[in-house]
Image (cartoon, rainbow, N blue to C red):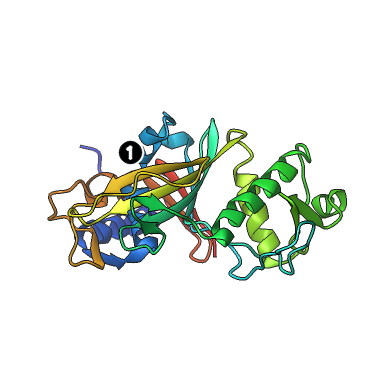
């Protein structure tokens, strides 16, 4: 019988997977539920979007940050006083489409009367990113941030207002460039998606949202309370990451420099 010893790197990855598959993880709110959806219900989300992308061609950005500040110009033709425009809960890229995702749950203030209504700054975030991607794609095979600034004279038209392009060398520009380059191999089409996680079986999930947005409803059966949710538990009767996702997931988190090259490519940007 062949005796194959593990390398230190292999042993470390195996140890990490073993630890993940034996622990219980409890989370609160939309951030935790977004991570749960991405690791437990990705196939369900893609099915609802009628996208049959195989996992080895799927790219996922988990909570990519484009700054926390920003302004909302009130007059047509006005320019925002900040390049920052907030954080998506996730961005999914497939060969046919790019999906800009906001995650809500049954306790979100945007959920009321069977409808999810995003705030104005949330809708603007989608429009700003669309403008960035369209401009970036138009630069050809070898785009640079300075060429983007030069071609658009430092600002992008977003509807009837203007948004300043992030300064060259800034963290915002680096984050945007990483995401935009990562999505270059994905489909040109873009869709705005709201994923609503319903953790209250007694509540009827929302059924309508903004025109042009796709609403995907996911039901989460296991909740510790009205606010705390068990994300992963190997003893749960639900399919869990411990059983079917973590050994096959490719997680890349630049601050840790750790990569597990498997099925689903997930990028964390801070």
Residue 248 visible? The answer is no
Quarter of the image where the N terminus is located: top left
- The residue depicted at 47 percent of the width and 45 percent of the height is 193
Residue 23 visible? The answer is yes
- The residue depicted at 39 percent of the width and 62 percent of the height is 31
Q: Which structural element holds mark 1?
A: helix
The one nearer the camera, 37 or 39, is: 37
Which residue in the protein does label 1 denote?
44
In this rendering, would 151 be left or right of 249? right
- The residue depicted at 59 percent of the width and 51 percent of the height is 126
Quarter occupied by residue 215: top left
The one nearer the camera, 209 or 222, is: 209
The one nearer the camera, 15 or 256, is: 256
Quarter of the image where the C terminus is located: bottom right
Of all residues, the one furthest to the front in this rendering is 113
Label 1 environment density (alpha carbons within 10 Å; few <14, some 14–19, many ≥20): some
Height in image: 96 above or below 147? above
Height in image: 237 above or below 112? above
- Residue 49 % position (x, y): 42, 34
Quarter occupied by residue 182: top right
């Amino acid at each position: 019988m062949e005796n194959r010893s593990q390398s230190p790197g292999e042993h470390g990855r195996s140890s990490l997977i073993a630890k993940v598959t034996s622990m219980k993880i409890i989370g609160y709110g939309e951030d935790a539920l977004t991570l749960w959806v991405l690791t437990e219900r990705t196939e369900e989300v893609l099915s609802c979007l009628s996208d049959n992308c195989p996992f080895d061609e799927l790219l996922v950005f988990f909570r990519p940050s484009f700054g926390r500040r920003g302004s909302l110009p009130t007059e047509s033709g006005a320019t925002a006083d900040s390049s920052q425009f907030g954080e998506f809960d996730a961005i999914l890229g497939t060969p046919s489409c790019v999906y800009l995702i906001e995650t809500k749950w049954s306790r979100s203030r945007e959920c009321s009367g069977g409808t999810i209504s995003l705030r104005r700054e949330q809708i603007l975030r989608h429009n700003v990113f669309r403008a960035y991607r369209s401009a970036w794609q138009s630069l050809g095979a070898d785009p640079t941030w300075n060429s983007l600034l030069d071609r658009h004279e430092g600002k992008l038209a977003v509807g009837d207002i203007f948004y300043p392009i992030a300064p060259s060398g800034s963290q915002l520009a680096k984050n945007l460039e990483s995401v935009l380059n990562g999505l270059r191999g994905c489909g040109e089409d873009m869709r705005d998606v709201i994923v609503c996680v319903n953790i209250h079986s007694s509540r009827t999930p929302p059924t309508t949202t903004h025109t042009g947005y796709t609403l995907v409803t996911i039901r989460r059966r296991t909740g510790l309370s009205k606010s705390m949710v068990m994300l992963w538990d190997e003893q749960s009767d639900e399919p869990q990451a411990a059983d079917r996702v973590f050994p096959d997931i490719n997680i890349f988190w630049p601050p840790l420099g750790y990569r597990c090259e498997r099925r689903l490519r997930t990028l964390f940007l801070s």
